[in-house]
Amino acid sequence: MAEARYRSLNDAVRERFGEKLYKLTLNAGCSCPNRDGKLGTRGCIFCSAGGSGEFASSAALSVSEQIEDAKARLSGKRPVNRYIAYFQAYTNTYAPAEYLRPIFLEAITRPEVAVLSIATRPDCLEPEILELLGELNRIKPVWVELGLQTIHEDTARFIRRGYPLAVFERAMEELHARGIETVVHVILGLPGETPERMLDTVRFVSASTASGIKLQLLHVLKGTDLASYYENPGFSVLSEEAYVDLVIRCLEVCRPDLVIHRLTGDGPKDLLMAPLWSQAKRQVLNHIHRELKIRDTFQGRLWEPAGREI
């Protein structure tokens, strides 16, 4: 850990697998109910045309070709033995199980793949998909990443998330019953959200069966509806100082064993409108680590095992 002040993904992976695992970002060729007309056509207000998969390989390639392509892009870092196969773009369970089975099997059965990670929505987990995930989880560990973003229904409606909190809770129960680990995505800085409301979302995730959390700074990207909203008077994004303070407060209320998969993020440079300071990802992480040390605080310092009424 960064001076043992929070349980980072790198530290948790090294403990479990005995080495660092690198992510290979892949594309299953799925769409999203918020884009294909089932729920809407414009996606969530912050979502770009790439569906959060700007760093993923092309779906025109086979899974094996995507893996080799992603490995080649990592080859300059250092010798790598094993990987996390991460299906990132759009909603990776939004397709029939018979379509997804060969795609996921092609990834998980490769000897260099240690973990299969699948980003999806909690309202896209039909019974046959859950059974498929359970089947895959018996081969190698499967992590399902769920985009929650917020527990507050008014914010969820504003960002066009497309499902109520109860759907997320049911999905978590179904995945937990099958022994499948879950990573929950939370966005910090959504319009109208106060720090206390954001902390309530983190407390909720910490009190759930989630094994990990991703804290993501709200990015304003070109071509999104959020970009238009950003032009309105009264809406501003978080400053670096405010974001660092908020992340530390989130870590303090996180369950001590919750794996922190992300503390910030860097949007595509050609699309990012704000906040521009987020492009210096290493600088932001160093700022967080430095402030944790200055405050002499750590993950779980204010965690309340009994949870909190939401």
Image (cartoon, grey):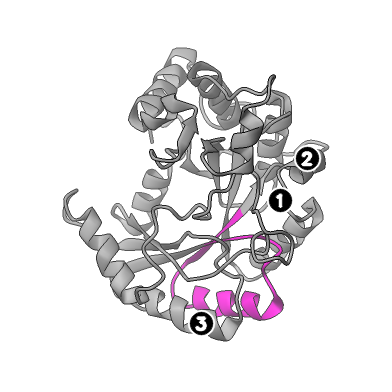
In this picture, which residue range is highlighted in magenta?
119-146
Residue appearing at x 38%, y 36% in the figure: 1
How far apart are the two marked residues, 2 and 3, measured between alpha carbons? 34 Å
Horizontal side of 138 relative to 209 (left or right) equals left
Q: Residues within 10 Å of mark 2 (few under 14, many from 20)?
A: some
| Kind of element beneath mark 1 | loop
Q: Position of residue 198 (x, y in %)?
A: 68, 32
| Residue to which mark 1 is pinned | 161
What numbered label is drawn on residue 5? none
Residue 145 colored in magenta in the image: yes
Q: Residues within 10 Å of mark 1 (few under 14, many from 20)?
A: many
- Can you see residue 81? no
- Res 133 → quadrant: bottom right
**Mark 3 or 1, which is nearer the eye?**
1
- Res 304 → quadrant: top right
| Residue to which mark 3 is pinned | 101
How far apart are the two marked residues, 2 and 1, measured between alpha carbons? 11 Å
Q: Position of residue 28 (x, y in %)?
A: 47, 70
Residue appearing at x 46%, y 39% in the figure: 7
Lower sequence index among marks 2 and 3: 3
